Structures are given as C-alpha cells and as structure tokens.
Image (tube, grey):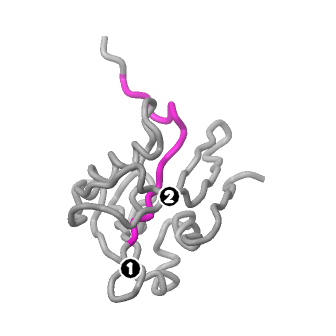
Amino acid sequence: MASEKMRYTNPSAGILILTRKLDGQKQVLLQQRGQTEMLANKWDCISGHVEAQETVRQAMVREVYEELGVYIQADDLAFVGLTHLRLDDETTYYNIYLTTDRFVGTPQIMETDKHDDLKWVNLTDLPTMANEIVQNRYEAIQHLGQPPFYSEEGFT
C-alpha cells in the first residue's frame, strides 16, 4: 500500500525574494497566483513547502527551478527573516524568508496551473502594489538590506 504524501509534516515554507539591478534600480520578481487554494490572485514571491528531508535552502533551490525554470545555489541565499503564523487552533506554521540576486536563466512561468503572471518590480514602486501583494511577503521585502526580522501573525 503506497503511503499518501502528508502535507505539513514539516510545517514551514521557504519564501525567496529574488532580486536584480536594472538601470541602477533594485527590482524584486513577483508572480501572480491564479485561482489557487491559498492566496488566490495575489502577487507573491517564489515560495514552497519545505519537504521532510530537505533544508529550507534546498527547498528554495528546488522551488525556483520548478516555478521559474532558473537555477540558484543554496550557498548564495541570505537570511531575511522568519514569520510564525497561527493558521487555526491546531496549526502553526513558519515562513522563512531568504534572498539572492544570483541566478542562471530567464525566469518564466513553469506552473501555469498555479501562476498567471510574472514581473520585475522596482522596490521604489512596491508601495503602489501593497494591497495586491501577500502582506507578510510585502513586509519581508521591506527588510531587505536590514538586520533579520522575526514576526508573528494570528496569535492573540
């Protein structure tokens, strides 16, 4: 009997803030979620669940290739921060934010069933999109270049 893959056995996700410089402006890559179960139609960073046998850095290397078709190196990832979320009365979850500006390839939507659009946004233009971006991702992007942060959501 094949065992069904259990979700949330490792209650954490890696969130990658992929950046680049273009014409002297720092930009972040955002992808728009489609009609997904979670965060439908929101602009988001590259993200994915950390599987049971991988580190968050390994998860990001895998997810970036799966979602964008580009390659990154785990050693190039820098820690940005961590958000501890309370999803419901029985579940807490950890979002671990990493960043890099080093990648090989041209980002493109690889999971067309999950994402509708992809675009580079100047950091200076992000405030105009604040209501369209997943809130904790927006807040994490604001911490680029600052000491790492820790935040909590959903707790009283």
Left or right position of 143 against 63: right
- How far apart marks 1 and 2 lie (CA) works out to 20 Å
> Mark 1 belongs to which amino acid?
Val
Please state the total of marks drawn on the protein image: 2
Q: Is residue 26 above or below residue 113?
A: below
Q: Is residue 42 above or below residue 76?
A: below
Task: Read off the residue under disc 1.
Answer: 121
Q: Would you say residue 12 sits in the magenta stretch?
A: yes
- Considering every residue shown, the one lying at the far front of the view is 75
- Considering every residue shown, the one lying at the far right of the view is 156
Q: Is residue 10 above or below residue 78?
A: above
Residue 10, x across and y down, in percent: 52, 34
Q: Quadrant of the N terminus?
A: top left
- Mark yes or no: residue 98 visible: yes
Residue at 45% in and 31% down: 52
Q: Would you say residue 106 sits in the magenta stretch?
A: no
Residue at 25% in and 65% down: 107
Give the SS element for disc 2. Answer: strand
Residue 133, x across and y down, in percent: 47, 71
Q: Few, some or many C-alpha atoms within 10 Å of disc 2 (few <14, some 14-19, many ≥20)?
A: some
Q: Quadrant of residue 53?
A: top left
In the rendered structure, which segment of residues is drawn in magenta?
A: 4-19
Left or right position of 113 against 22: left
Give the SS element for disc 1. Answer: strand
Q: Is residue 114 above or below residue 31?
A: above
Q: Few, some or many C-alpha atoms within 10 Å of disc 1 (few <14, some 14-19, many ≥20)?
A: some
- Mark yes or no: residue 112 visible: no
Left or right position of 52 against 20: right
Q: Nearer the viewer, mark 1 or mark 2?
A: 2
Task: Read off the residue under disc 2.
Answer: 78
Q: Earlier in the sequence, mark 1 or mark 2?
A: 2
Q: Quadrant of residue 112?
A: bottom left
